[in-house]
Structure formats: C-alpha cells, structure tokens
Amino acid sequence: MTETLCEVPGCDRPSPDGAPVCASCGTELHQHLVEVVDGLAADLDAALARQARLGGVGRRGAETPLPYGEASAEAIWVLRTALVGWVRILEAEDQPFGPTCPGRCEHGSCTWVTTQTLPDDTLPSMASWLARRVQGIRWHPAGGEAVDELIDAVRQARRAIDRRADLVYCGPCGSPDEDGQTCMADLYARPDAPVVRCRCGAAIDVHDRRMWLLRQAEEALGTAAEIARALTRLDQPVTPERIRQWNRRDRLIPRDHDARGHPLYRVGDVLALL
C-alpha cells in the first residue's frame, strides 16, 4: 500500500489517514488561526490606530525602518485576502444540495442549511470559522496550499507586530571585486532604501535590481501561493485566490503540475495579467 505524504510545502510527513495534509500540519494551522482570534488581529488594529495618531507614514530616509503602522497595514491586507479566499472556497464547496423540509425534521442537511452562517467580515470571525473547519481543510484537494498560505499570512502579521523592518532581497551583487572576481554576496536592503551597498564596495540601485529579479523569475514555475508570496514581496501584490480565479476563467493556463498534482503557473504569465 502506498504511503500518503503530507502535501504542505516543506513537510513530507506521513499522513496515515490518507488526508492530503497530515494531522501535525492541521494542528499547527489551528494554532495559528486561534492566535488571530486571541489577540493578533487586535494588535494589528492597534498598530494602525497608533500610526494614525502620529499623523501617517510620511517620507522616510534610507536608514529609517518600515513604520510599524505601514507594516501592519500590509500584514492585514495579506491576512484578510488569505482568510477571505479560503472562506469562500470552503463555503462554496460545503453547500448541500436540495431544498429543506417545510417543517421540523432530523435531516442533517436541513439542519446544516438552517443553522449554517458565514463569518462576519472581521479577521477574528473568519479565523474562528476556518479553525472549526481544519479537518475539512486537511481533506481538501488543495489543503496543502491552504495551510501554507494561511500560516504564512499569520507569520507575516506576527512579524509586523514585532516591529522588525523586513529587509528586501536584491539578489547577488554581481560586481567585480578588487581581485577581479565577480562578487556573489547576497544583498538585502531596507524597504525604502534607494541604494544598497555591498561589502565589496559596490553600490546597487535597489529598484533596478528588483526589476531585474522580476525579469529573471519570469520563466520560473510555482503554485498560486508560491507565486503570490514571491511577487508581493517584489512589490507586485497579488493574492493566490486571484491567480486561481484567472485559471478558472481560462485567462491563466497551468504550464505543468508538481509531483502531487498541484497546478504550476509561469511567473511571467501572472505578471502579464497584473
């Protein structure tokens, strides 16, 4: 009998009950969703309110970290789109067929229809709704993508609360060093820095270099969640759900599938639709 392995990127643990997502990843997802309910969402809102009281973001110098409020606003957007996307997917696929009975009955489907409600349009409500459906996410064909996307969104929110400015990757230096060799040191810059300086002494334009990274990535293939995460970090915001919608509308065609059958899209095809 073939052993089922967890489809969450980076996991590969066995899933003895045959679900696409192992029980451990399901538990981890539940813990992250509960964290949103238990205070993370409120902390994000408080960060935005604090920034508003300070009079907005304003212009920043190259050495000034990404403001707390701005990082929180981005984290809220990423988290909201992830939660909304998976609430919609699960709600659409969880609908029973047929009308309800006119009077009292004990049919499970009738009870589901008459008692089922969608969550409020708030981060805690949507996170709580999904937390109660972790088992369904484990068995969903795209459950691995769901777990990866949702956990990553919660982690980004947590980083925003920690007040640490995320450095942006600018690729390898590529400049000749004093010995005439090509310097391959990886470069990282603050989000608003116009120039990043390498330890070899080279000064690299951040915007030009990140556009170069986008061009280099055009032929790469990835899942909806992987491409959305990478492009958003390269200042080309897009959500996994939007990529999937393009596919459902035949505007975006998968170029391949991974070993587990997940559709793989070409980065350049996604960029052309932005």
Image: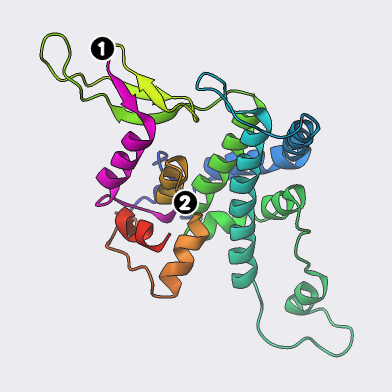
Please provide the residue range marked out in magenta.
202-224
The percent coordinates of residue 124 (x first, y second) are 75, 47
Q: Which label sits on residue 200?
A: 1
Crowd class of label 1 (few under 14; some 14 to 19; many from 20; radius 10 Å): some
Please identify the quadrant where the N terminus is shown: bottom left
- Is residue 175 shown above or below 25? above
Q: Where is residue 170, by image quadrant?
A: top left
- Secondary structure of the residue carrying tag 2 is helix
* Colour mapping: rainbow
**Residue 94 at least partly seen:** yes
Amino acid type at circle 1 is: Cys
Q: Residue furthest front?
A: 59
Look at 46% across and 26% down and name the residue there: 193
The percent coordinates of residue 52 (x first, y second) are 77, 36
The percent coordinates of residue 128 (x first, y second) are 73, 50
Look at 75% across and 57% down and name the residue there: 121
Q: Which label sits on residue 68?
A: none
Nearest the viewer among 51 and 142 is 51
> Which circle, 1 or 2, is nearer the viewer?
1
